[in-house]
Amino acid sequence: MSEKDQIRVKDRNDLIAAVPYLLGFPPEDSLVCVVVDDDRIRFLARLDLSVAAEGPELPEATSHLAELLARYGQQAIILGYGTPDRVGPVAELLRAALLAANVELFDAIRVTDDRYYCLNCDGECPPEGIAYNPSTSTLPAEATYEGIAPMPSRTALEDLIAPITGPRREAMRTASLAAFQRLHTMLFNSAATRADVTDGESSGSPAHVLQNGVEAVQQAIGVAARGELLSDDAAAWLTAVLTIPEVRDHAWRAIDGSEPHRRLWIDVTRRAILEATAAPACLLAIAAYLGGDGALANIAVYRSLQADPGYSLARLLHGSLIAGVAPQVWRDATIGTTD
């Protein structure tokens, strides 16, 4: 999140209170590593212990994470969320990786519902742990004032972009079939080279088709700015024209990370038929990324790649999220490279 370099923590209680706001959800079965500098949080990353425990490449994953953290500072804190047998071994691997990357491990704790336990064995924590109370920290109030609020869980964040169901789903499928037929007819009847829009990676579309697509994007942004939702027909047409890379690229370059853009692409992602989900989900990931919501960005880009594992823009963004590239750096670097 973009505000984390402004957050100052005074103690462990502050840090524990801050993590759900920085991640976007309360971590579970996770290892969170925070880079600090002069008591300010500069960067944080989360390692999913359920994935880490199953993967044979855990040493490489912790080494990569340590190298990433080293780009942001020379002091780090580990917070483990889970049972001792899940947290301990991975924390030890990360500790060694941080040392190899010349990053000092400033502190390491395991956090439960109401207590934390020291992992650095310095004798400071009793065996029964130390009670903490996030409500005594001012950080949640400061984050709320800035408009930052965590979801109850990662699952709740995933539910935020879950596909619509029932009659609404059927209505959108009907509208989408009509929209794709309309686009197909426009392309077929054009004297220009026909574009293949079925794989989401076509190019060379006729000028009048591109103009229609750009207009659909601009109209959608205008509707979102007024706090309104697109009609089924408008949403379906938008998902259809977004299968044209030039239109999609116009859409992502228009994204500014604002709340209206975030709402727009959440709505369109939820309403898109499976075959047309990759583009709006990727655009949502970009909106979240530019808005400082890394948790939503990761979930949205995963949704895009689920719909189309080869989707080039989503793959590019996914790599940048893993590497911890700053949003504006990514945006500047990818202009003209996503076709």
Image (tube, rainbow, N blue to C red):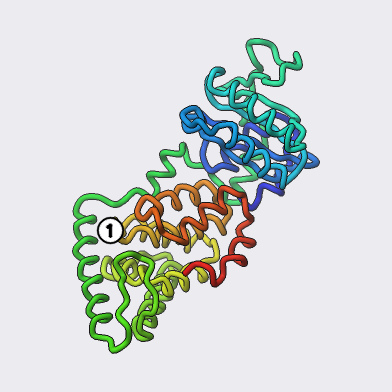
Q: Residue furthest right?
A: 38
**Is 213 or 8 nearer to us in this picture?**
213
Q: Residue furthest bottom?
A: 191
At horizontal 59% and vertical 26% (from top left) the residue drawn is 90
Q: Position of residue 32 (x, y in %)?
A: 60, 34
Q: How many marks?
A: 1
Please determine whether, in this image, residue 149 is positioned above or below residue 14: below
Say which element carries label 1: loop
Instruction: Estimate how packed mark 1 is, as few (under 14), some (14 to 19) or many (20 or more) residues with alpha carbons within 10 Å.
Output: many
Q: Quadrant of residue 276?
A: bottom left
Please determine whether, in this image, residue 315 is positioned above or below residue 215: above
At horizontal 70% and vertical 40% (from top left) the residue drawn is 35
Please determine whether, in this image, residue 330 is positioned above or below residue 306: below
Side of 111 where 168 appears, left or right = left
Q: What residue sits right under mark 1 in the picture?
A: 273
Q: Is residue 109 visible?
A: yes
Q: Position of residue 264 (x, y in %)?
A: 42, 62
Q: Position of residue 303 (x, y in %)?
A: 39, 50
Side of 51 where 39 appears, left or right = right
Q: Residue furthest top?
A: 127
At horizontal 30% and vertical 72% (from top left) the residue drawn is 196
Please determine whether, in this image, residue 310 is positioned above or below residue 8: below
Q: Position of residue 288 (x, y in %)?
A: 51, 55
At horizontal 59% and vertical 64% (from top left) the residue drawn is 331
**Is 39 or 73 nearer to us in this picture?**
73
Side of 173 where 131 appears, left or right = right
Side of 291 where 169 appears, left or right = left
**Is 45 or 167 nearer to us in this picture?**
45
Q: Is residue 28 visible?
A: no
Q: The disc labelled 1 sits on which kind of residue?
A: Ile
